[in-house]
Every structure is written in structure tokens, then in C-alpha cells.
Image (cartoon, rainbow, N blue to C red):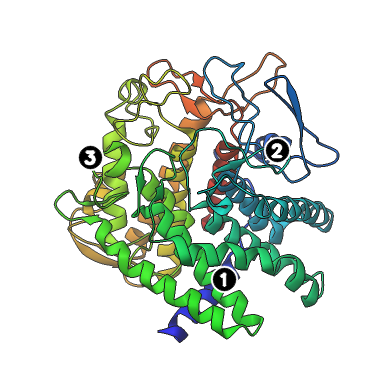
Amino acid sequence: MYRQWMKVAAFVLFFSVQTSHAALPYSPFTVAELATVKAYLFKNITSTSNPFIKYDENRQIFSSPGAVLASPSNRGNRFSQDYQFHWTRDAAITMHYLVSSYSSASNAERRALRDYFMNYINFERMVQKQVSNPGEQTLGQPKFNIDTTVWEGPWGRPQNDGAALRAYTLIGMATIFLNVKDEKWVRENILPLIITDLNYVVSEWQNPSFDVWEEVNDPDHFFNKMVQRKSLIAGAALLLSFNDREKANQYAKTANDITASLSGHWNESKGYLTETIKQQENKGGGLDSSIMLGVLYGNLQLPNDAYALSTDQVMSSVYHLRETFANLYTINREHPDNAPLIGRYVSDVYDGDQFKNGNPWILTTNVLAQYYYDLAYLYRAQGVINVTKLNLPFFKQINPHLVEKERVVTAAQHRVLFNAIIFALIGEGDKVLQTVKQYAACYPDKTCLHYAEQIDRDLGTQTSAKDLTWSYASLLMAMQSRSKVA
């Protein structure tokens, strides 16, 4: 089992920095538009040349370089709470997007990216050293002030996905810096941060924590487990390259234990994976978009993984998510020819600050597009598409006439149909992003393509936190995936 995990670990580590993006013919976003979106993302990452000052209860908080603001919104916007924090999860996802952009960047862009990586590394080093209130663990803190200090206001604690996501992002940075600095520098400056996070994952993954939406406290969250498993596998590969076989074995074993526990999230009677196992009637505990997030952000990129993009359980879950949200929101029902906007879960009431009706989220909709692109890429790489009783509704949801019955479609023997399915998946991803683009906001300063956290379910206007960093990162990651397959 150990050798098997080491092969998987090496595969994950290799692919962590091997993606890139560019605009393509008929692409939902042009090169110039993507540059605009990326500029908004960078605006939310602090540096010496891009500082941020937060005015908080009659005091000023000055940013340390490397803080990633979840959003520049605060309570001054009546539709939003204070988002001027460095969320461990959001920051790690954002910085991982930059890591994955590195391989396709020019030399000048790479130098600039390395500066951002250094700032992030230094910021997280200071974060890990902070001391939390008694009974709390700093590595389980959901968010920090932009000066690296712990924020101790009322919130859902602990959140155990952040340490795993940060570790995986740092592993990608370590891989990059091994090519531009010596091994000793990486061992001294990045490896200790990774080990600290992964040791925390090993000790805490079975304990109760809050979900990705920061609402449900439970020991079994699908999203958390998926990203924890992936980070441990990648960490095992990195530690093995540093000849630390003992830790590599420990991380690989824990990843194996997490995989075994994931089987409990399948609800056969309902036909989808559930976010939690026991709290399926509590908020998003059942059918939840965090399943898609977990599948994509925890993707091992191996077709034989039980939670690969092409497995029946995953495809059936995506089918049910899309079907549910298509009929839930007014703007989806009124525009049936558009790909639907996707929310978090059916009973969601968080709309920014009013807590009346949950809305579609931009990031969850972007993730649906990324799923279609990544699935098309996987099928093309495999050369075979297995249409089963459980995933047939998924294909019919895209096009009722695409596949009529259960069958095996191979690139070698059924090239026309095989290519039709690939192009249908790419086209569906494009439709999703075209819907997202339709709801982009323009500001009084005449800048456009702004994206907040949510889109009002009835009016189609953007609401909640403006310029959400994760919204931009998820759009750019979706386009990155489109580039790979197209």
C-alpha cells in the first residue's frame, strides 16, 4: 500500500504546477478580459507596493505583505459583513492558482510570482507562530487579521481544511523553489511550515470541525477529507524526496485511512455524495456544492480513484446539484436556455447580511464549469467513456440526445461519438461561464467584469461581499482547465 501511495503522491506533486491558461477561439473570456480579472485578484493580495489599511473600531490595522483579503468589503456595505481578513482557506486556494500559473509564465512573470510566494510564505510563518485563546489551536483558526495576528471574535472554530490547503499550496511553492534555490533553503524555510500543517492534519482529521461554509460542526466533512487526503499524499512525496521516510509513511497511512472513511458519504438511496454523514438534514449536510469543491480541489488526477471526476458517484452528485439549483432560483427558471447558476445548498439563507434567502454563488457556479472541463480532459486522456445507469442522467442533462443508453464509448472505435461528448462537455463549461459573464458588474469608475460573492436569486444583481478573491480565483482556474482540454 505504501508504494502505491508513493506513486500517487509523486503524480499529484508533479501535476500541482503543470497547468496554464490562455484565451481560445470562442472562449467565454478573451485574453484581455482574463487580464482584467487577474488584476482584480492581485489587487486583493498585499505587498510592500500594494499595502492595505483596515479601519476597525477606532483603530488601524496595517497589512503585512502576503495577506490575501477575502474581499475589500466591510460593514460599510449594507449587503456584506466584514471580509477584510486573511482566511486561511481562501488564501491558500488563491495562491495555489498562482502556483499553477507559474509553469506557463514568462521569466519576468515568474520573478514577480516568486515575490508573491515569498510574501505568502513569510506571512504564514508568522501566522503559525501566533498564540490563540485557551482551548483553541492556531492551526484551526479560520481567519487572521491582515497583520498576521489572530482574530478572536465569535466564529466557528476549529476549521481543519485550512491547514491542509495551505500545506498543499506550500508544497507547490517548495517544488518551484527547489529549481531556483538550493535544497537547504527549502528545507529551512518552507518544509517546517508544511510539516507543521500536515502533523496537525494527522492529529485532527477525525475530530469535529466546521465545514467549508463555516456553519456545521461535525467530524465528517467530505470537502475537508478530500483536501486533507490530497495534501498528505503530496506531502508524503515531498518528505520522501528529503529522505524522511518515517513522516512520509505516516502521511501516506493517514491518507489511506481518510480514503476508507470517505465511503460513508455516499447516500445510495438519494444517488449523491453527502457533505456530512450524520447531519444530512442540517443546513448543507446533505446535497451541497462543497461536494464539487472537494472533488476538484482534492482531485488526485487518477482515473482509478474512487472519487475521480468520472466515477458514477461523483457524476450522479453533480447531476443532482445542477438539477436542484436550476429549479430553485427565479433567474434560473426565467432563463432556461442559460446554464444555471449554482448556490451552496437548498436551505441556505445567508445572503450577505440579511439572512433571508440564499443566492447563487459565483465561485460555486465557476466550479461547475471547471468540472465539465476537467472531466473532458480526463476522458480525452483515458480514451474511453463508460456510460452507466447511474451517470446516464448526467449526460442527458447536458444534451438529451447525446447518449441514449448505457454503453462504453472509446476514442478508437467510436471516434465521432467520443468527440461529440468531449465537445459537449467543453461547450457546457462555456455555457456556464457565459452565464457568469452575463451577470458581471460595472462600477461607477467605468471598470467592468467585477464579481462579488453572490448574485441575487430574483433580481440578478450582485450582492454580498464585492470583488471576492475566491470568485476571481475560481473563474481563472476554470479558464485554466479549459485551456488544458481545448
Image quadrant in which the N terminus is located: bottom left
Quarter of the image holding residue 167? bottom right
The residue carrying pointer 1 sits among few (fewer than 14), some (14 to 19) or many (20 or more) residues within 10 Å by Cα, namely many
Foreground disc of the pair 2, 1: 2
Question: What residue is rendered at 55% in x and 27% in y?
Answer: 452
What's the residue at 58%, 22% (across, down)? Answer: 441
Residue depicted at 36% across the width and 52% down the height = 221
**CA gap, disc 2 and disc 1:** 27 Å
Image coordinates of residue 9 in percent, x first then y, are 52, 74
**For residue 101, side relative to residue 236 (left or right):** right
Q: Is residue 103 above or below residue 329?
A: below
> Residue at the left extreme?
269
Q: Nearer the viewer, residue 130 or 174?
A: 130
Q: Name the residue carrying label 2.
A: 146
First reached walking from the N terminus: tag 2 or tag 1: 2
Q: Position of residue 116 (x, y in %)?
A: 76, 50
- How many angstroms separate mark 2 from mark 3 (CA)? 36 Å
Choose between 484 and 178: the one closer to the eye: 178
Note whether 283 is above or below 4 in the view shown: above
Q: Which residue is mark 3?
A: 281
Mark 3: few, some, or many residues within 10 Å (few <14, many ≥20)?
A: few
> What residue does disc 1 label?
235
